[in-house]
Amino acid sequence: MIAEIISFGTELLLGQIVDTDAAYLAQKLSQCGVSVYNRATVGDNLERATAALTLALSRSDIVFCIGGLGPTGDDLTRTVIAAALDAPLVRDPALVAHLTAWFEKRGYTTSDAIFLQADVPTGGVPIPNANGTAPGLWVEKDSKTVVALPGPPNEFVPMVDNEILPRLQGTGFVICSRTLRIVGMGESVAEEKTADLMAAANPSVAPYAKPAEVHLRVTAKAASADEAEALIAPVADEIKARLGSVVYGEDDQTLEEVVVRLLEAQGKTVATAESCTGGWLAQRITAISGSSSVFHTGVVTYANESKTGLLGIPRALIGAVGAVSPEVARAMAERVRDLGQADFGVGITGIAGPGGGSDDKPVGLVYIAVAGPSGTELTKNIFPGQRADVRWRATQTALDMLRKQLIG
C-alpha cells in the first residue's frame, strides 16, 4: 500500500510550529507495512490544498491529511476532501448531538461554526476523538482512501494509535529497522567500509550524519516482524564486525547511557571538571537514571580563579601555558579525580567561540583529558561549527574517551 502525508497549516510553512505529527505517523505506518512515498505541507489556501490532495490521490492508495479540522475559517480540510473526491459535505446528526452534549457539559454555548465539525464528505465515516471536539475522517471512493486527522498532538497521537493503526493491520508485510550508532568515525569512512552492504535492497543500509556521530539504519521488509528481524540481524552483525568498537549502541541508546551502564557494570565512578562546556558533560551523565551510583562530583571551573581555588591548579601553570592547554586539561582531570575520590576524572578546557580565538588557539580548540587507573589520556581537538556545536562535540568526545577506557 502506497501512502502520502499532507500537513495543512500556514503556521507550518512559516516555521512557527514544527511538524512532529507527520514524522510520528510515517514511523507508525512503516511498522504496518504502509510505504510513504511522498510528504507535503500546504498552507491554508483552498485552491492549493485541493490541488495537493488531488495530486496525492493520483499516485497513492491512501492519503493522510493532518490538521485543519477545527471550527475556524482557516480549517479547510473537510472542504478540500469533498472537492478532491467530489463527495459533497453532509452534516451528521450524531456528530451534532455529540458536539452539543460536549459543550453543554462544560457550560459552553454552541455556534454555527462549532457544527462545521459535524460535516462529513459523502460516504465518509467519522473517527472518534477522545481528546477534542474535531472528529477524524475516513473516506473511501474509487479504490482511494483519505484519512483526516486533527493537528494537536494530544489528539493526533491517540487517534493514530487507537483508531488508525488497527485499521491498517494485515497489509501483507511489515517494515522494520535497526539503527547502529557510531562515534569516532566519519560518515564517508563508515560508508566506504560498508558500501557493498548499502548496495543491497532488502535489507537496505543507509547512513545518516548526526552531530558528532553517524547512524547506519538497517531496514527490512517481510511478512512479519520476526522475519524482518531475521533479515536485519546478520547484516547488523557484519557491520559491527567490520567497524569494531566505534559502534557504541543501537536504536535509542545514547552515548551517555552506554557509558553509565558500563560504569555500573564495572562498579566504577567518574568525576568531571569542565570549563568551556559549562557542566554539559555532567548534565548528560546525570540525565541517565541510575547515574547517582557512578557520578558523585562535577565542577564547572570556568574562570581561572576557580581552576586554582577549587581544583588547586597552580596559578603559575595557568600563567605559563594558558587555561586552554594540554597541561591544564590534564591537571583538571587528575585533580577532580582526586577531589571526587573517583575511578576516572574528566577535564575539558577550550574555546567555544564565537570570540576569544587567536592564531595559536583558534575557536574550536578543545583539550580533553581522562584520568584513570592506567594513567591519563589527552586529546587535542579543533571542532567545527558554532558555539553549541563545539560544546556538544566536546562532551561527545569526552564520553567516547571514557567509554574506550572502560571497554579496554
Image: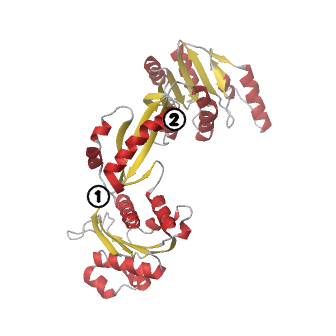
Give me the residue at 30% from left, 48% from top: 190
Quarter of the image with the C terminus is bottom left
On the question of residue 69 being in view, the answer is: no
Kind of residue at disc 2:
Ala
Give 210 or 57, whichever is nearer the viewer.
Answer: 210
Where is residue 255, by image quadrant?
bottom left
Percent x, y of residue 64: 52, 27
Q: Which mark is residue 190?
A: none
Judge left or right: residue 260 versus residue 392. right
Above or below — where is 308 with respect to 175? below
Question: What residue is at 64 percent from the left and 34 percent from the top?
Answer: 162
Mark 1, secondary structure of its residue: loop
Q: Quadrant of residue 313?
A: bottom left
- Find the residue positioned furthest to the left: 359
Circle 2 sits on which residue? Answer: 225
Colour scheme used in the picture? secondary structure
User: Dot 2 lies on which element?
Assistant: helix
Q: Residues within 10 Å of mark 1 (few under 14, many from 20)?
A: few
Q: Is residue 335 above or below residue 229?
A: below
Q: Is residue 20 visible?
A: yes
Observer-nearest of 53 and 366: 366
Number of numbered markers: 2
Q: Position of residue 180 (x, y in %)?
A: 40, 48
Q: Where in the figure is residue 362, as x and y percent of width and height?
A: 25, 66
C-alpha gap between disc 2 and disc 1: 40 Å
Amino acid type indicated by mark 1: Pro
**Which residue position is annotated with label 1?**
384
Position in image of residue 310 (x %, y %): 44, 83
Q: Nearer the viewer, mark 2 or mark 1?
A: 2
| Of the image marks 2 and 1, the number of the one nearer the N terminus | 2
